[in-house]
Image: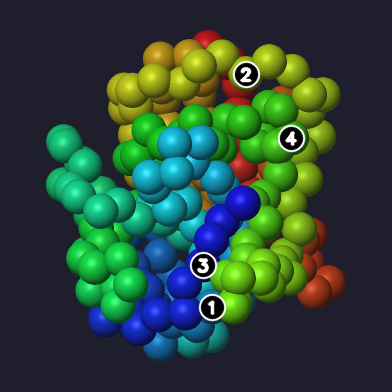
Amino acid sequence: MALLHRADIRPTKLELLAAWLPTRDWYEGGVDVARVAGYRFDDPAGQVGIETLLVAGGDGPVHQVPLTYRGAPLDGADEWLVGTTEHSVLGRRWVYDAVGDPVYAAALAEAVLAGTGQAEEYFEVDGRREVRPPSMAITSDAPAVAVPVVGAVLRVVDGDPTLIVTDTVELGVIRRPGSTAAPAGATLTGSWDDVRVSLAYAAPR
């Protein structure tokens, strides 16, 4: 489960992305970035926020941007830093392009290879749990299997798709869903409104 906070965030996530996305070679759109949909994964340790945003810039295509939120900098990940925000509840948060974060790699591997699905999002309101309905659905076509433990991210090839090589699993994140087909193998599919597209894929090494 993902506990959300009713909080002010400065700058906002979309403001960060409006400045960062145009620096990516795979981005096709303007600086007027709008949220289309999104989904979250759980960090079993409860320390890292993991959220994937589906966004579009102006009349450009929808892009998939996985982000991790941390309470301190991630060692060795400066090239994946999107920026920092001030969260009115949690304080300063370091926001990373999640493809360089091992916590995201482990969560994505579980979602693709074991079909763990997305985290339920909720607010605490007067001691009661208020669930926020998901804005999209994600499903895996892989049979549920034991997923090898994912450790360090060894290499990232940024592009569309973005390839994440870990010690036990290779992952692909499709940056412009619908622009390219996932290779044969275990695939994560997303759907919202009348759209159904491949989001990511994975294979044990």
In primary-sequence order, the first of circles 3 and 4 is: 3
Task: State left or right for residue 179 relative to residue 190.
Answer: left
Per the image, the residue denoted by label 2 is 147
Q: Position of residue 113 (x, y in %)?
A: 68, 27
Q: Position of residue 7 (x, y in %)?
A: 40, 80
Per the model, the C-alpha gap separating discs 2 and 3 is: 28 Å
Asked if residue 64 can be seen in this view, the reply is: no
As shown in the figure, which amino acid type bears the numbered disc 1? Arg
Question: Quick one: SS at disc 4?
Answer: loop
Task: State left or right for residue 176 relative to residue 74.
Answer: right
Closest to the camera, between mark 4 and mark 1, is 4
Q: Residue 63 got which mark?
A: none
Per the image, the residue denoted by label 4 is 115
Question: Quick one: SS at disc 1?
Answer: strand
Q: Quadrant of residue 32?
A: bottom left
Which residue occupies the foreground of this view, 188 or 177? 188
As shown in the figure, which amino acid type bears the numbered disc 2? Val
Closest to the camera, between mark 1 and mark 3, is 3
Identified at 59% across, 77% down, the residue is 125
Asked if residue 42 can be seen in this view, the reply is: yes
Q: Residues within 10 Å of mark 2 (few under 14, many from 20)?
A: some
Q: Quadrant of residue 111?
A: top right
Identified at 56% across, 56% down, the residue is 2
Q: Position of residue 146 (x, y in %)?
A: 68, 15
Q: Residues within 10 Å of mark 3 (few under 14, many from 20)?
A: some
In primary-sequence order, the first of circles 4 and 1 is: 1
Q: Residue 35 got which mark?
A: 1
Per the model, the C-alpha gap separating discs 1 and 2 is: 31 Å
As shown in the figure, which amino acid type bears the numbered disc 4? Gly
Per the model, the C-alpha gap separating discs 1 and 3 is: 17 Å
Question: Quick one: SS at disc 3?
Answer: loop
Identified at 63% across, 62% down, the residue is 121
